Image: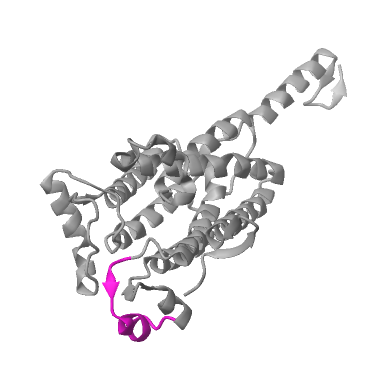
Amino acid sequence: MLESVAFSLGPIHVRWYGIILGAAALIGLMLAIREGKRFKIVPDFFMDLLLIGVPSAIIGARIYYVAFQWADYKDNLWEVFMIWHGGIAIYGALIGSIVAGSFYMRAKGYNFFRIMDILAPGFLIGQAIGRWGNFMNQEAHGGPVSESFLRDSLHLPNFIVNQMNIDGVYYHPTFLYESVWSFVGVLLLLWLRRRPFLRAGELFLGYFVWYAMGRFFIEGLRTDSLDITGPSWVASIMNALWSPMKIVFEPGALTYGGNIRFSQLLSLLIVIAAIITIIVRRKKGYASEHYSDPIVSSLAVNTNNVVKEDETDKGVDYDSNRTV
């Protein structure tokens, strides 16, 4: 079994989980900076976004998790802040980072959808890499499976098979399923963003469609899902949509006594909302810009207009480039 602690500095233990998440964030940043140069956006803009987005993601991820597990925290509020004890959720991280980042984009005069298009592949590759932190911690796995399933059916290498042996029981490597799904999604997004038909905002929305589809089916295998008790007809729809997976897999057990996995429900709603948004934005003309069109900050436009007006007052004719 691989150790979750990478190294120690006295009483301070540096865990692989943190190292892997840090690497994931930096690789996502590099992708954004590289694509941003194509639109003449300075690297500092994306580095500032990362500095704002990472803490916001951690806060959002923790709030999301605690909200659904409030019974475990209401009698011990200090535990809410002890994030090193575990308990974060990726959808909460996305909500926190996107909300905080949107304020920064607005302050810099950039269109939200145009910047999120650039960030989308970075989000997805960050998630693909970040899931290996769950692997090191032996968490976010699925239900029990046989060793032969991992070795002979999935043909996984020894280091993964051994790490999926937890207290003598082998489990579904759902971290791996989601990581592979996300890596394929990155390739798809990189291909899509060079297609002439792609409109502004659609790469970002496509990211949500891809990730949420995969999360819906993978979540059904997990045994640590945040679940809720909802209408039986909603649970029936969810089970029916997931039922093709039963040809190969058995669903993971619901941990907290509910009948609906909230991440599955949210994934389904995200897919529907993203597709509707793409259609409506095209119908209403909100997506008139293409992905490849120039990105210009409204602050730069306003500053340029002020300069031109000032120069016009001084007698400069920009149309004829002569003094009048």
- The structure residue drawn at horizontal position 11% and vertical position 47%, both measured from the top left corner, is 232
Placement of 132 over or under 41, stated as above or below: below
Image spot of residue 177 (x, y percent):
39, 68
Which residue ends up furthest to the left in the rendered image? 232
Classify the position of the C terminus by image quarter. top right
Is residue 148 in the magenta section? yes
Residue 294 appears in the rendering: no
Which residue ends up furthest to the front in the rendered image? 11
Placement of 299 over or under 244, stated as above or below: above
In the foreground, 71 or 41: 71
Span highlighted in magenta in the image:
142-157
Quarter where residue 213 is shown: bottom left
Residue 78 appears in the rendering: yes
Is residue 228 in the magenta section? no
Image spot of residue 100 (x, y percent):
53, 35
In the foreground, 14 or 322: 14
Q: In the visual, does 233 lie left or right of 252?
A: left
- The structure residue drawn at horizontal position 27% and vertical position 60%, both measured from the top left corner, is 220
In the foreground, 82 or 238: 82
- The structure residue drawn at horizontal position 17% and vertical position 43%, both measured from the top left corner, is 230
Image spot of residue 140 (x, y percent):
38, 61
Image spot of residue 76 (x, y percent):
37, 37
